[in-house]
């Protein structure tokens, strides 16, 4: 293979955002005794996932400021369950941001593929997540040492899908676009973003979602990267 450098997305690609979020939400559900406020744990998680995905999608499209995710996410969730308590929502939000990144679950095959790739390629994380939170996720799940660099949108001054964050990641590490391959789960931020920077792509699509985006490669399991790299 012609590639000399691998760029990886973090959330939903390596770090198992869904499982880790569900564990943190279940802890918070108990801690804040939300059952006694008439909420069901499963419904609380479902509402979180729906509202969180909508807000991240707006953020990725440049239609929402990151502080709105932090300050409004749990207020919207509680309102859905007929609880109008902004103070409570801020306390839950604060605790969620502390607890969730400390969860350790990785996507299936993650450690196996990183062990395989580590001696062969320099690897760089390119992420739109919040700075300190992304580094906590890497260290708590024990995968920091696999990566030569971590490029966050705050550090680059641009967020995916802007081509500039990919160009910044390459420039910081001494590579150019034809050297690199971007691996991620998001068709807009990861795939269209890398294509904007003329970087080849691997679409990680574990749910086998239908799409007609022009990705270079597509995989359903991380370990399938062994056949490409
Ligand atoms: Mg992702």
Image (spheres, grey):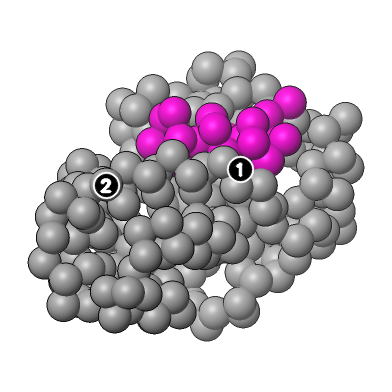
Q: Is there any visible trace of residue 210 in the rendered image?
A: yes
Examine the rendered structure and indicate whether residue 133 appears above or below residue 200. above
Q: Is there any visible trace of residue 195 in the rendered image?
A: no
The number of discs equals 2
The residue wearing badge 2 is: 91
Q: Residue at x 15, y 50 (%)?
A: 87
Find residue 66 and report its image quarter: top left
Give the x, y percent position of residue 4.
74, 31
Q: Residues within 10 Å of mark 2 (few under 14, many from 20)?
A: few
Give the x, y percent position of residue 187.
46, 62
Give the x, y percent position of residue 27.
50, 58
Q: Residue at x 49, y 28 (%)?
A: 151
Q: Nearer the viewer, residue 137 or 211?
A: 137
Q: Is residue 200 left or right of residue 5?
A: left
Question: Would you say residue 168 sits in the magenta stretch?
Answer: no
3D distance between C-alphas at marks 1 and 2: 32 Å
Q: Secondary structure at mark 2?
A: helix
Q: First in sequence, mark 1 or 2: give its number.
A: 1
Span highlighted in magenta in the image: 125-145
Q: Which mark is residue 40?
A: none
The residue wearing badge 1 is: 8
Q: Nearer the viewer, residue 219 or 13?
A: 13
Question: Would you say residue 128 sits in the magenta stretch?
Answer: yes
Q: Is residue 111 left or right of residue 18?
A: right
Q: Is residue 18 left or right of residue 84?
A: right
Give the x, y percent position of residue 29.
41, 64
Q: Nearer the viewer, residue 103 or 28?
A: 28
Q: Residue at x 44, y 39 (%)?
A: 98
Q: Secondary structure at mark 1?
A: strand
Which part of the image, by quadrant, shows the N terminus? top right
Q: Is residue 192 left or right of residue 119?
A: left
């Amino acid at each position: 293979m012609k590639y000399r450098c691998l760029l990886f997305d973090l959330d939903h690609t390596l770090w198992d955002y869904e499982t880790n979020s569900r564990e943190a939400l279940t802890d918070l559900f108990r801690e804040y005794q939300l059952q006694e406020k008439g909420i069901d744990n499963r419904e609380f998680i479902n509402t979180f996932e729906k509202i969180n995905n909508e807000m991240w999608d707006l953020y990725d499209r440049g239609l929402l400021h990151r502080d709105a995710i932090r300050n409004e996410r749990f207020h919207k969730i509680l309102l859905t369950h007929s609880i109008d308590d902004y103070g409570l929502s801020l306390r839950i939000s604060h605790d969620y941001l502390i607890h969730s990144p400390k969860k350790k679950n990785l996507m299936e095959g993650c450690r196996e593929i990183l062990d395989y790739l580590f001696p062969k390629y320099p690897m760089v994380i390119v992420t739109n997540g919040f700075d300190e939170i992304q580094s906590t996720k890497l260290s708590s799940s024990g995968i920091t040492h696999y990566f030569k660099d971590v490029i966050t949108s705050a550090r680059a001054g641009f967020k995916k899908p802007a081509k500039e964050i990919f160009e910044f990641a390459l420039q910081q590490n001494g590579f150019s676009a034809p050297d690199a391959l971007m691996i991620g789960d998001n068709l807009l931020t990861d795939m269209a973003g890398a294509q904007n920077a003329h970087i080849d792509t691997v679409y990680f699509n574990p749910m086998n979602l239908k799409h007609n985006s022009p990705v270079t490669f597509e995989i359903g399991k991380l370990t399938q990267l062994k056949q490409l790299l």
